[in-house]
Image (cartoon, rainbow, N blue to C red):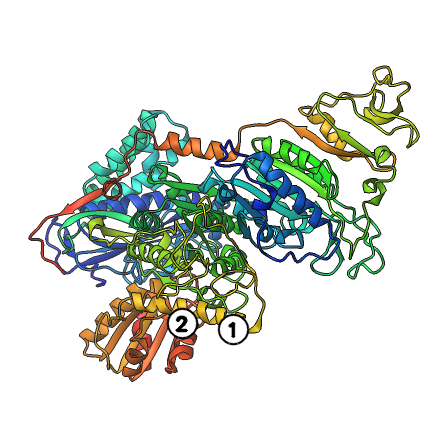
Amino acid sequence: MATAFKDEHTSGHTPVQSDAVVVRFAGDSGDGMQLTGGQFTLSSALAGNDFATFPDFPAEIRAPIGTLFGVSAFQINFGSSAIDTAGDQPDVLIAMNPAALKTNVGSLREGGLIIADTGEFNQRNLDKAKYSSNPFEDGSLAKWQVLAFDISALTLEAVKPFGMGNKDALRCKNMWTLGLALWMFDRDRQPIIDWLNAKFAKNQVLADANIAALNAGHAYGETAELAGPLKQYHVDAAPAPAGLYRTVTGAESISYGLVAGAQLAGLKMFFGGYPITPASAILHHLSRLKEYGITTFQAEDEIAAICSAIGASYAGQLGVTSSSGPGIALKGEAMGLAIMTELPLVIVNSQRGGPSTGLPTKTEQSDLYQAVYGRNGDAPMPVIAARSPVDCFDCAVEAVRIAVEYMTPVMLLTDGYIANAAEPWLVPDLAEYKPFPVEFLESVPEDGFKPYARDHKLKRPWVKPGTPGLLHRIGGIEKEVDTGHINYAPANHQAMTDIRSAKVNNVADSIPDQIVEQGASGAKLAVVGWGSTYGPIKQAVRRKRAEGVDVAHVHIRHIWPMPKNMAELLKSFDKVIVPEMNTGQLKTILRDQFLVDAKPVNKVSGQPFTIAEIEAAIESAL
Amino acid sequence: MNDMTPVKATTPKDWETDQEVRWCPGCGDYAILKAVQRTMPEIGGTPENTVFISGIGCSSRFPYYMETYGFHTIHGRAPAVATGVKLANPDLDVWIITGDGDALSIGGNHTMHLLRRNLDCQIMLFNNEIYGLTKGQYSPTSRVGTNSPSTPYGSVDRPATPCAFALGSGARFVARGFDVSKNLPEVLKAAHAHRGAAFIEIFQNCIVYNKDVFEDFAAPKGADGHQLWLRNGEPMLFGSDKSGGTKGIALDRVGLTLKVVDVVDGDWQSAGVIVHDVTNRSLAHMLVEMPFGEFPMALGVLYDDPRPTFNDAVIAQNETASAGKTPDLGKLLAKGQTWTVEEGHPET
């Protein structure tokens, strides 16, 4: 990403050309910043820009108005070349009130532009934001460009003809601001107008008022440009492979991937879920897709959510459950049951900051130990991790494949950042995905029926209750080899523990070798990552390599078991660093599995890594 | 319950597995197992379409001994597993086997919600008022003062009343029986005939840790004076000349409570004895709370008033929501706010 929001190509009133721009919309929880950001994202997509977004909102649904903890922000990085992160530092901060300015201005690039609504900078709101003096008057914003004017009053003026009350009229402020942003970045208003008309189809006055506000904001830009510091910028379309694109969030992408996986397996899907941030969106998406043979069940708790999914898998459907850290902890015992009974199951963990309730709406990668080790007994389970919203689709398909091909629960890790963030997605051609149809055992095999007989992969047969001649009982008590009867004998437990472990290890036979994203094996330094650190690592390594640094990027999707070439690959590097949004969990696993001297690079602030942070880590490692 | 046509008639033997039964000799579970194996042929189901799902505890070993499909799950979670099984395949006849600790302590939440939702299944709660498998701790149904390893000075908390819990949770079928009762198969058949969640509390004698705790009413001697077997449309009579005369249950119209009345010469009408109506929910509430001692133990079908089931509602909604829609994932992915990048655009 280039922070190229500069004045280099100004000439008259033609828009300034920029390579990439980071804009952050910040306001009160009730100001509609997520909606504004979402629509600005759409306009970026339609302009052909590559982009990445970062919705950053509080856990409180409607925090008290004007408070620091009630600020909701939406950051978008869009550009004319590949964009992989939501941007280290905003170039433009749109602050709808003092609290939004206070909490967000620190990250604004020096020389960046602040657009603020002075209508909200009254004494009361300044007090709430804990400003002892008005920042526009005390010189504290000197290192930035400031464009402060009364957006509230301008909005009221714009929607006056519609006769709305003051409170309702002010709710159009976000559209006024969006209109200004659309002007600033040389964007077409029509798609937003269409969207407003559709959204308020049942209330034409509201639609018209919002459109009027949008147009007024846009017109203000045109006028102000003639008189003030406001400039118009143009970001060209980013080069991209031809095809049909859409925007997609991680939660959407996982949901579609699960549907695709179930179709490739030839199964109906049962999804048991319980509301939890930031995982609920998957339950919401799947609940609308009943025609795809999906039953969704909002259970009474996390335990019932996974147990119902296990029950559905037992009955012959694809059981899926989803949660975030605290809920995953509650599901732990049931995961052991799925391991013991060797039933397919997909468990999605949209990670958030922990421990305990932690940071419900902030992102973290601190559930890796929980995923790999977090069950009683020797309870091996495949774990895979998605790196981006788009990658969630393929990872979900892969999770389903492993679950049914090996009769095992599979943990799919994503995180709050991936779940909420949006990026452009080249809509996949489903014909390119190889089906993995499930074959249920439906009659007694020649050598007799044994519920825990194994195929060459060590998979046991899947028998649906209702099948004549194959009656059997399963459960969480140790199974006898082959027969599945209760058996506590020492040699049998040793044998079954070994089989469960070997079966999960066999998954490695079905996954591709670990590739090196950039650079090559044998580099002086490898930056090894997993999950949503992909974007900042990729860009940081790209920049360092452009400077001639011998650094490689390895990004691990299959965390347990790992690709078979991993040991050899990791040992080829002189040094290995592992940036993670935790205190060093993958680092520990790599050391444990491969005896490599992996060094941790950790961040647990609830915010994704910036590119600069990874660059600094690379520099200090070499 | 299911409307299944039997492929061929079965015998109790067809429902027995080859597994060695591992309950303590003399455990009430043996009698319940026999009663269930005797009942199944009469219900007319097939072993392959029958699933027994249990939690953890002595009672939860039950599925291993039934020649059906079986799932011995984890502590308290059988109702949740059963919900997934039934929603995934509503044709299966689902039986949940649980105990007082499993269903009312660790699994109380699931029991409540399964009953509230009215999943079509039978829930057999073996109540022995003790934790047997963990060696005798008091349970949520143990009486106040129960001495156990964890309550050496006697338990101090009040027990739950399983049938009252079930009714309070919205159950539409509530019945009671006890392990060695000859009437148990009749109760099980009624439960199976009820479409929806059928809750059956079965008093079960734990001969090791809580021996004979139900003897007051379950002992053959004096049974007719201590057991009120409820039958729909029949007066609530119990006792005989042997036990000190025929008695009945009547309504105390002043206190709005039940009372025991003497029935002279069989004239229960003039004694005001209530005729049992299994659809009367108010009556059911009074019967489940009827204190034993002053009153006989209410047994049999206390309440039976079916309502649409959860599984039917889920499947009906799935069908309605799917009606007229052709699932096409490719089209779904390409829907909404999309844009096209044309060929010839420089690739990264």
Judged from the image, the secondary structure of the residue bearing numbered disc 1 is helix
In the foreground, B8 or B237: B8
The residue type indicated by label 1 comes to: Gln
Which residue is labeled 2 in the image? A586
Q: Which residue corresponds to the image point at 83% horizontal and 15% vertical from the top-left?
A: B269
The residue type indicated by label 2 comes to: Leu
Which residue is labeled 1 in the image? A494
| Residue A521, position as x, y percentages in the image | 23, 79
Q: Is residue A184 at least partly visible in the picture? A: no
In the foreground, B66 or A577: B66
The N terminus of chain B sits in image quarter: top right
Q: Is residue A90 above or below residue A195?
A: below
Q: Residues within 10 Å of mark 1 (few under 14, many from 20)?
A: few
Q: Residues within 10 Å of mark 2 (few under 14, many from 20)?
A: many
Q: Quadrant of residue B133?
A: bottom right
| Residue A552, position as x, y percentages in the image | 25, 75
Count numbered badges in the picture: 2
For marks 2 and 1, the one nearer the N-term is 1
Q: Quadrant of residue A525?
A: bottom left
In the foreground, A583 or A131: A583
Label 1: chain letter: A
Q: Which residue corresponds to the image point at 20% horizontal and 60% vertical from the top-left?
A: A82
Q: Is residue B253 above or below residue A269?
A: above
Disc 2 to disc 1: CB gap under 8 Å:
no
Taking the image as shown, residue A356 lies to the left or right of residue A223, namely right
